[in-house]
Image (tube, rainbow, N blue to C red):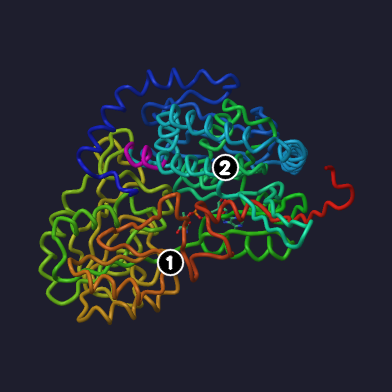
Amino acid sequence: MLSVFTKTARSKALQANSRVALRYLQASKLSTLQLPPVPTAHATKETEPYFTSTYINGQHYKSDATEWFDVYDPATDIVVAKVPQSTDAELNQAIETAEKAFQSYKNLSIMKRLTLTFNYVELLKKNTDRLAATIVYEQGKSWSAAIADVQRGIQCAEHATTVTKETEGFSLEVSNDMTSHTIREPIGVIGSIMPFNFPVMIPLWTIPYIIATGNTTVIKPSEMCPGTGAILAEIAKEAGVPDGVINIVHGKAPTVNKIVSDPRIKAVTFVGGNNAGKYVYTEATKNGKRAQVNLGAKNHVVVLPDADKQTLLKGVVAGAFSSTGQVCLSTDILFLVGEARKFIPDIVETVKALETKPGFQDGDFGPLVTKQSLERLEAVIQDAVDQGAEVLVDGRGKKPAGFEDGYFIGPTLLRNVKKGMRCVDEELFGPIFTIVEADSLDETIDYCNNNEFGNSVAVFTNSGPAANRFAKAINIGQVGINVPIPIPLAQFGFTSNKASFLGDLHFYGPSAFKFLTQAKTITTSWKGIDYK
Ligand code: NAD
């Protein structure tokens, strides 16, 4: 579960927060540390922005860039960092370094790579608070959501240690004196392009698998929250991963264009929105690369009258509002089937009670990532109002005291919405939830199946047969039954489909090993002297 909204989880996280400073000191013993001090509070007017490091061949560099973008603390609208548009020379150097490192790293024995992957898991755990703090500071998540972001990533790193099983070959004696066997070999330099919303979990959908399988990589974090990239790379160095295996570059379209076009990069992974994602897939595959592209979404929840009320209310909160609704599996539309309308008053009260706070104060959720996101969502609400929607809970203008400049919007609940409204037609990516009343389960199944996206869908019911029918009839790749955000655990892989995915092999899980390796079949015949 991505959700971190139980009181127990939150109070545990707050206790952890009070120990943060001490644990940073322990984590900061990394030998090459040249990163800025780890934040423990939000930015103030006195805050001095730091330069985000470029990480090539195991070293941090300040870029020679002429163009630098601002990174904001979303809770305060204060610039906390500058991130470069990596220069052509830097991009070339990163790719060349990764290619050179691949020539030796691919020959490191699988047992040694396995040890490195185990080391990486351990160091990620030790650096959880440090990574989470950077997420809160640059991306805006509440502390407990940031911890969950890191922990979900660590689960993928743990799964990457199954490399010996997942890359095992097949052997067959094909005739007398002749055997064929397959081995799976790494493919080379992997280029990875990251979104803003999970600055640790999503890089860890690939980095540990790259370490385990013997590939090397050039990674471009989101320019909105780039700080965790170099920390993840540096932790790998501390784990013993050779210099050059993991390299971090920065920027916008020019960096992406280099990754999808440079022939030294053999495969591309991308997670993000539709426009950039479709472009990346088209260009990468046109240039002969493997590509794995996770895209946008529009996710629905169906509620039957026999749903358990408490499970449903927790599901509403986790599905629509965790991580400020900035999750590709966030639920935008709640279908209440028939008598399930009876849940509306409780849903309204639950949503009203949610607390929006700056990340380090750890409320139910933090601010949006940018001022543009805030303006877009306020316009989406206004559009619904103008077209006759009812606003059951209005989050506009709700700012925590002392953080009036932050990109905050309170929880918002709309009703009487219809197609043609932006809240129904667009991916929201914010803490806005819409209620739609439906007459039958079949009607909702048809609606969801006609959704162009295939990230996730959920049903809340106590009826096994109804749930089974729903799960079978739905054409979406990830289905929750009384689970609002059915993100598969690392062992399964992220099985989104339709317009939410381009490629053949999904992120993490068993398919990650297939994506990052290629099969070679060796046929052997020993004839001649027979020693007796
Ligand atoms: P985005 O598409 O704006 O950015 C993703 C990456 O693409 C960034 O690194 C960005 O620098 C780059 N990029 C953006 N515009 C580009 C352009 N014109 N040319 C080249 N590169 C460009 O996405 P985002 O705002 O960071 O993330 C939110 C989106 O990502 C949502 O749509 C969400 O659903 C999706 N997402 C999907 C998944 C999934 O697994 N399906 C997971 C997380 C996020």
- Does residue 457 sit above or below 96 in this rendering? below
- Residue 396 shows in the view: yes
- In this view, the residue farthest toward the front is 532
Q: Sort mark 1 into few (<14), some (14-19) or many (20+) by Cα contacts within 10 Å.
A: some
Residue 216 percent across, percent down from the top left = 67, 42
Is 182 magenta? The answer is no
Residue 402 percent across, percent down from the top left = 27, 35
Ligand 1 lies under 8 Å from the Cβ of mark 2? no
Is 249 displayed left or right of 450 in the figure? Answer: right
Residue 464 percent across, percent down from the top left = 22, 69
Is 102 displayed left or right of 442 in the figure? Answer: right
Residue 441 percent across, percent down from the top left = 24, 78
Residues at circles 2 and 1 in contact by the CB criterion of under 8 Å: no
Question: What type is the residue that disc 2 sits on?
Answer: Ile
Main SS, magenta region, reads helix
- Residue 247 shows in the view: no
Q: Disc number at residue 477?
A: 1
Secondary structure of the residue carrying tag 1 is: loop
- Does residue 1 sit above or below 437 in this rendering? above
Q: Nearer the viewer, residue 103 or 415?
A: 103
Instruction: State how many labels appear.
Output: 2
Secondary structure of the residue carrying tag 2 is: helix
- Residue at 54% x, 46% y is 222
- Residue at 83% x, 51% y is 526
Q: Sort mark 2 into few (<14), some (14-19) or many (20+) by Cα contacts within 10 Å.
A: many
Q: Nearer the viewer, residue 391 or 145?
A: 145
Q: Earlier in the sequence, mark 2 or mark 1?
A: 2
Residue 443, image quadrant: bottom left
Q: Which residues are magenta?
A: 143-149
Q: Nearer the viewer, residue 112 or 152?
A: 112
Q: Find disc 2 in the rendering and name its residue.
A: 207
Q: Nearer the viewer, residue 209 or 362?
A: 209
